[in-house]
Amino acid sequence: MGRKKKKKKEEPDIWDETDVLHGIVNKKSWDFISHVNKNTAGFLTKPWCDNLKINAKSGLWEKFGGLADDCFGLAKNKAIMGVGSGPSLNKNMDVLRERLGADGIKDFDNRNYVTICSNHQYKPLLNQGIIPDFVMLVDASDVVYEQLCVDVPDHGKNTTLICGLHCAPKMLDEWDKQGKNIRFYVNSTEDVQSAFKKHLKCDPKKYSMEMGGNVLNAAFVIGSMVMRSFVFLAVGNDLSFPLNDDIDKQRDGYYADGDYSTNAAVTGTGRDEAKVMKRWAGFNLTKSPIKLINPKGLDRYNIELDLVGTSHTLWVYKTWLESTILRTSVVPNLSLHYFNCTEGGILGVMTKDVDYEKFFDGDDWRKPENWYLLDEKCRCYHTALLEDAMEHFDKCKEVFERGEHPLIAMS
């Protein structure tokens, strides 16, 4: 008789073993993202591995190498500026252009910021005169080809692409032909890591990271784990979109630049995220008209709630990031700060366990007492206007360089 195959030992659930999540992250939401992650991996593993096999033969890995090889510690004592494609990004474009423009002309050692943008915002930033240091790609399909490879301004050659070897070969080949740099990471999925080891004859552990599903989540992980930055500033990370009775106008408002082609049925993935009618309360920030003696933290702003649309996918990104920040906040001897400078959206907007559908059918969602921001529960999470967060970091860095130890938190 043959030996009985041992059952694979199930790993403990992170939520069950992490007290800091309890009472803040809804257990149903956590279970939902776990379910989605497993389904996504099961559905996409084959195309990911197929792409990796093709890219392994192209010589791109040998030519460019892994992100962890020469970008480790790149952003030490600098802040990561993560630029997403949410609709509120337009509120911050002038600040980005002015502040990053002034910072970008300095010698790298003297700069305060390293910019990582989404594939969707690569050309729009270049057209504004902003040259991102890195553009981040997590999508494995070629629907992003035009965003990254077609009609790119000449100064776009100064931006390095961060992506996985599981990404579309067509896109990577064209990026290489245009004379641009690439740095690779390895998807944390077990099958992808096995494929990497098989085709590259290299241990994937050094290059493996759990990326959180979208660009801003991935940029946060890379900024802290690889580039060793302790401050992350996020703009355009709405994870939501304005509601509109006209579905075409709702699609137009999904991204800051109005380009919905990557989500559409014919030109993109066909997911049509803007059509999914999940709702949540987003927020709007304005400066408080009262000049405070000590203007730090949320008391410097007026905060208003607004009903917005989101999707199950965007909801997963929100829950994953909030959970990751909370878990990070209790790590001993680690000072890591996340500034949400989006000026809108649903990230960090929390409520108690409720029946979500019934909750939004009535007027309960309009009551401020039913909501709170993650700032109130997490010492390393800060909701702020971009100009305030950048000014705060710049001053803290000046103090740090004088040999003192500033308190980074705006609280």
Image (cartoon, rainbow, N blue to C red):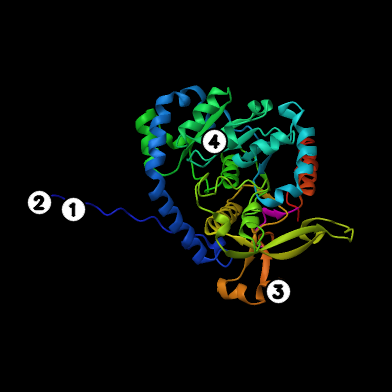
Q: Amino acid at mark 2?
A: Met
Q: CA distance from mark 3 to mark 1?
A: 58 Å
**The one of 5 and 163 positioned closer to us in this rendering:** 163
Picture quarter containing residue 56? top left
Q: Amino acid at mark 4?
A: Tyr
Residue 119 at what x, y percent from top left?
A: 60, 39
Q: Residue at x 89, y 58 (%)?
A: 291
Picture quarter containing residue 191? top left
Sort mark 2 into few (<14), some (14-19) or many (20+) by Cα contacts within 10 Å.
few
Number of the label disc, if any, that sits on residue 4: 1
Q: CA distance from mark 2 to mark 1?
A: 9 Å
Q: CA distance from mark 2 to mark 4?
A: 55 Å
Q: What segment carries the magenta color?
A: 377-384
Q: Is residue 28 left or right of residue 297?
A: left
**The one of 150 and 39 positioned closer to us in this rendering:** 150
Is disc 3 placed on a helix, strand or loop?
loop
Please indicate, yes or no, whether residue 191 appears anywhere in the rendered image: yes
Q: CA distance from mark 4 to mark 3?
A: 44 Å
Which residue carries the number 3 mark?
Answer: 367
Is disc 2 placed on a helix, strand or loop?
loop
Sort mark 1 into few (<14), some (14-19) or many (20+) by Cα contacts within 10 Å.
few
Q: Is residue 43 left or right of residue 151?
A: left
Tag nearer the camera, 3 or 1: 3
Q: Mark 2 vs mark 4: which is more N-terminal? A: 2
Q: Mark 3 vs mark 2: which is more N-terminal? A: 2
Q: Mark 4 vs mark 3: which is more N-terminal? A: 4
Q: Residue at x 58, y 47 (%)?
A: 217
Which residue carries the number 4 mark?
Answer: 145
Q: Residue at x 27, y 54 (%)?
A: 7
Q: Residue at x 53, y 44 (%)?
A: 267
